[in-house]
Amino acid sequence: MIVTTVVAAGWFFPTATPRAQGAAHRAVHGSSTAVTQGSITTRGSVTNGAQAPIGTFPSQPPPTTLPTSGGFTVSGNSILQPNGQRYVPYGFVLEWCTPMPGLPCNAASPTIYQKISEAATYWHANTVRLQVSWEQLYGGPNGTVNTLYLSQLDREIQQANSLDMVAIITQQTEHLGGSIMPDSHSLTFWTFIANRYKSDPLVMFDLFNEPRLSALDVGGKDQLWSIWQNGGTVTGTTDGSDGTYVGMQTVVNTVRATGATNIVIAEGTGGDHDLSGLATHALTGPNIAYGTENSLRLLGNVPNYTQAQWAANFGIPSQTYPIMMEAFLGTPGTVDCDPNSPTVFPQLLSYLQANGLGMIYFTLDAGEGIVGTNLEQPTTFQGSQTLNCAAPQATNTVGPGQAIHDWFAANSTPIG
């Protein structure tokens, strides 16, 4: 194993702002905003030869208007809204319902537009996190931008913004076998995305989903954090992790080179479970936040359900840095599932609230946040002392959905 350190070195204007009747929207519990569905579009090719289903989208984008105030900013360990109030994310990771491995989608699954609508009106969310792949974005003829895929993203962002929600764009590489860390494709991706959305203050950029290079492949955690920060070339691994990676600082610099001042989010190492290296490898520049996916079980089936563990993993770092609690997952059929969830999950919510932290939950799919395909029927822990992690996810009814709904309703406020 050899590691070489490398030192970091036509726009769409989505007319999006806080809805005028935000409080009234959030008072609607039994109904949702209707989204007219258009026809299924054609499929674009992906560089690896697979087909990239584009999905369906509304026949017309929702009417929206732009914010009159400035963008979000980082101040100390907080993200501030344009009106100066602290932004705490309460929301969901949403993936396009396409037949990719691991996505529980079928013909009856709700569309992403229905999920965005219900996230705001029923679940009281103020944030949606959208997973966007380089392979599909550049799945047009001869590696060009797939305009149909891009149109879908535009409409999702417009819809979310019109409902007073922040839209976080995440570069996702897992489902189509992409890089395990930011690479040269990330720079192409973010140059395009940042230019397209840099004047929309309700869009944030999550630079790379779950950096997955292992400390075992590079000689330890410190070397891993060095590559995470500044990049490097890794060779001689036994698990296919060889590659040249550009580092999060280079990705930040690439975004800023476009003139974009949007909040950027850098996820931690270890598949977004580890923030321990921030003290010595924090990124430089304005408006930088950090992400972590701390479920009740971490990689390697390690329990993560005591206040001491939460403090070490994200509580203490959040006293210094703006921390985004991303993609909490813990449902049957996942490695994050913990049988003690009915008891421990409410304690986690109390800890997050006491420390000024929200949650972005994964996701509004069958057996995870909801029962079946009903976006207004949350899973629940009521009457359950333990969670059966071996239960079929598609028919599972036990989970944190109702607790999340109630917690969002009590604490989330529209973006203003």
Image (tube, helix red, strand yellow):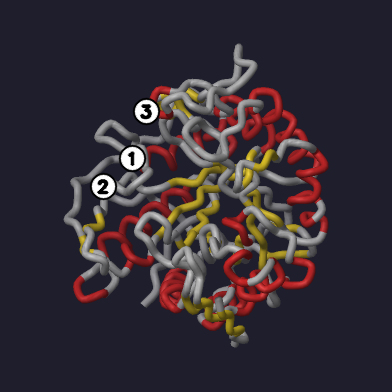
* Cα gap from disc 1 to disc 2, whole angstroms: 8 Å
User: On the image, numbered disc 3 is attached to which residue?
Assistant: 373
Q: Nearer the viewer, mark 2 or mark 3?
A: 3
Residue at the top extreme of this rendering: 383
Q: Position of residue 90 (x, y in %)?
A: 61, 43
For this rendering, which residue is in front, 147 or 278? 278
User: On the image, numbered disc 2 is attached to which residue?
Assistant: 56
Q: Earlier in the sequence, mark 1 or mark 2?
A: 2
Q: Earlier in the sequence, mark 2 or mark 3?
A: 2
Marks 3 and 1: in contact by CB < 8 Å? no
User: On the image, numbered disc 1 is attached to which residue?
Assistant: 111
Along the horizontal axis of the image, is 284 left or right of 28?
right
* Cα gap from disc 2 to disc 3, whole angstroms: 17 Å
Q: Residue 261 sits in which quadrant? A: bottom right
Residue in the image at 37% along x and 57% along y: 153
For this rendering, which residue is in front, 283 or 305? 305
Marks 2 and 1: in contact by CB < 8 Å? yes
Q: Is residue 413 above or below residue 155?
A: above
Looking at the rendered structure, the kind of residue marked 1 is Thr
Q: Position of residue 105 (x, y in %)?
A: 32, 38
Q: Is residue 230 above or below residue 105?
A: below
For this rendering, which residue is in front, 125 or 301? 301
* Cα gap from disc 1 to disc 3, whole angstroms: 10 Å
Q: Nearer the viewer, mark 1 or mark 3?
A: 3
